[in-house]
Amino acid sequence: MTEGQGSFDELLMQQRLVSIKADSCELERAVGDVGRALRRTQEQILDGWITANPEAYAGIVWLADRDAAAGLRGSIGYYAELLRRPRDWPAGLRTIMSRGVTRPEGHVYVINNSIRALLVRRIAAEHPRIADVFETRRSKADPVGAASTWQGVGHAAL
């Protein structure tokens, strides 16, 4: 290989790297666009769920408020499962759930896993007094500057 050939190969390699970086940036932008579109769709699903189940939303807020007052960490998974088992509802939750909407005997509340994180963020935004009851991981869909409260596996529970 001649000295000129080496310089040409280096130049070619640099051009390929620039092209790869540009492709990577373009892919990152596309993934971001898809993520934002998915978030909008999930927010529409969440809005629909809250509209269809206002008493369940109020019940989850009540449970989170109760846990916050007791110094406990909230769990959207636990709250969702509790909503599915009316026989296990505490008296306060029974009161909240009986307001307004009348459901048929045996009605089961279901919260899709894909909207649970958004539900937590919605509760935190609409009810700042209980925002810290939930642990949240940072999401690319979060607004700039949003904080994460997640401490990772094995963190100390409150």
Image (cartoon, grey):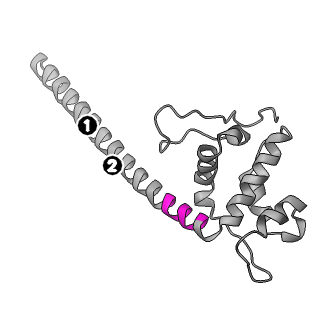
Q: Mark 1 points at which residue?
A: 22
**In-image side of 46 versus 38 (left or right):** right
Q: In this orientation, does residue 72 appear?
A: no
The residue sitting at 29% across, 34% down in the picture is: 21
Residue at 47% from the left image edge and 39% from the top image edge? 143
In the picture, residue 17 is in which quadrant?
top left
Where residue 122 sits in the image (x, y, percent)?
59, 50
Q: Name the residue under label 2.
A: 30
Instruction: Give the extent of the magenta segment.
Output: 42-50
Q: Within 10 angstroms of label 2, few (less than 14), some, or many (20 or more) residues?
A: few
User: Which of the 4 image quarters holds residue 111?
Assistant: bottom right
Q: Quick check: 18 above or below 42? A: above
Residue 88 percent across, percent down from the top left: 89, 65
Determine the residue located farthest toward the front in the rendered image: 100
Query: Which one is earlier in the sequence, the residue at label 2 or at label 1?
Result: 1
**Amino acid on which disc 1 is placed:** Ala
Q: Is residue 15 left or right of residue 67?
A: left
Magenta stretch: dominant SS? helix
Up/down of 23 relative to 101, above or below:
above
Q: Is residue 112 magenta?
A: no
Which numbered disc, 2 or 1, marks the residue closer to the eye? 2
